[in-house]
Image (cartoon, helix red, strand yellow):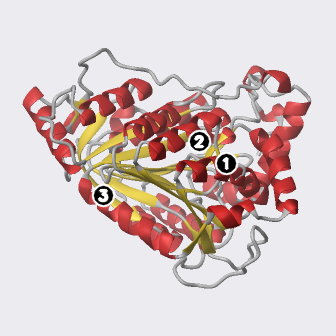
Amino acid sequence: MRAKAALSATAAALLAAGAVAGCGSVGVLPQLDKVEVPQPPPGAAPPIVGADEQPLPPERRKAVLTRLEAESGGSGGGGADTLIGRRLAVEAAAAGTPLVAGNRVTLLHDGPMVFRAMMAAIRGARHHINLEFFIVDPVGIGEEFAELLIEKRAEGVEINLIYDAVGSKDTPEAYFGRLRAAGVRVLEFRPLNPLNVDDIADWNPNDRDHRKIVIVDGRTAFTGGVNLSASYGDRTTNKPGPRKEPGPVPGVPWRDTCVRIEGPAVAEFQKTFLAQWRAHGGEELPDARFFPKLPMQGDAVVHVIATEGTDGPPAFYETLLSAIASATRRIDLTEAYFAPPPAEIEALAAAARRGVKVRIVLPKITDQPKVVFASRTNYKTLLDAGVEIYERRDVVLHAKTVSIDGVWSSVGSANLDYRSILFNDEDIAVVLGREFGDAMAALFEEDVARSDRIDPERWAERPFGDRIKEWVARLIQYWL
């Protein structure tokens, strides 16, 4: 979005100066050509917990795995050595966190829908509201949120907000000052000015908090790609927009995806938020106030994966590669900024070559043209392998979702580019279950119906000028 360009420019300048911690010189930047996904011991069962974070008894766990196996088209008995059992054991090993059973998950697929659901939950808050956003706009929906948060604080509801210093760099301090004056606790994530950092050794302007999380009373959580931004002011269904590709986006609606989660998995989001709050200077918030007893709410199994900036592949990326490698029927991927390392391109191509139906929906209109040109450098490899590529018309596509075999789905903040994989703090929710998978499939088909499919023969004849732009974007994609 509007802050991504500023972030890219800031990061590029710092990298060029050799000032970004953990990155070193350009000559030693990690390329991630091959990623070794952590493997559990043979026969290891995936850890699955339920209410009160208690491990499911063996028979309950087997029943969950049997159902998921059947929903994914398998015929195994739900043991650790079945396809679904092995897949989930690898995923848990990569992330180091348990899968959580007994959740109700609702798919939300445009900004106004997301904000209505969030604000309804906030209005009903009785104890606390925790919010974590990359971008907090001071106008439009940002102003509406501010008014509502101030109102809830006056009712005695505890409110804690984390915002990113780069993502919200255009938001005046008066906006956050007004919230603080009302009693809202506000934490700026990694200030850009080193004078505002308690310990200069911790100053790392290239590490950004790209998460989008809202938690209400420890019972309802939201996550996805939606920032608290005025860009989502219009619905994103059939409103026409400019056809220039890629180009300016004033007046063009944004299409994004978010989930609302109710059930035991909400505690995992709460842990993620509180860990971030404490790690970056927030005052002490006693755990006992934030973890109510959470009964089972539905059948969805949820795996919450939160990662921090690193110099190697994070858990969400290892999880995705593992899921792609184990896909047997189909992979549907929707991505706002698709400029991934070679390991993912090869994984998608390999899946298509072994007979998996692989489809990718990417932006035609974007706020970041360089990323689109970088993503197009991968088209030939994917098309040659049999991958279907579509470019979404009429909206700025900002969603980051994957659905595999109709039963494994992910929604979150992480883009498939070097910045999300190596630098940003991100989170995703992996949702296991046919009901949610069907909702994801229906949304994907809507996007495909409003997209232009890339024809391999016509693509091979694209203008030379576009090829030059792609080549240049490819050279700098690490910093985009």
Q: Position of residue 164 (x, y in %)?
A: 67, 46
Query: As shown in the figure, which amino acid type bears the numbered disc 3?
Result: Phe
**Mark before the other along the chain sequence, 3 or 1:** 1
Query: In which quadrant of the rendered view does residue 117 lie?
Result: bottom left
The residue that disc 1 covers is 378
> Are circles 2 and 1 on residues that touch, CB within 8 Å?
yes
Q: Residue at x 70, y 54 (%)?
A: 376
Label 2 sits on a secondary structure element that is helix
Label 3 sits on a secondary structure element that is helix
The residue that disc 3 covers is 436
Q: Furthest residue to the front?
A: 457
> Are circles 3 and 2 on residues that touch, CB within 8 Å?
no
Q: Position of residue 50 (x, y in %)?
A: 20, 37
Q: CA distance from mark 3 to mark 2?
A: 26 Å
Query: As shown in the figure, which amino acid type bears the numbered disc 2?
Result: Ile
Q: Residue at x 38, y 44 (%)?
A: 430
Q: Residue at x 67, y 81 (%)?
A: 241
Q: Residues within 10 Å of mark 1 (few under 14, many from 20)?
A: some
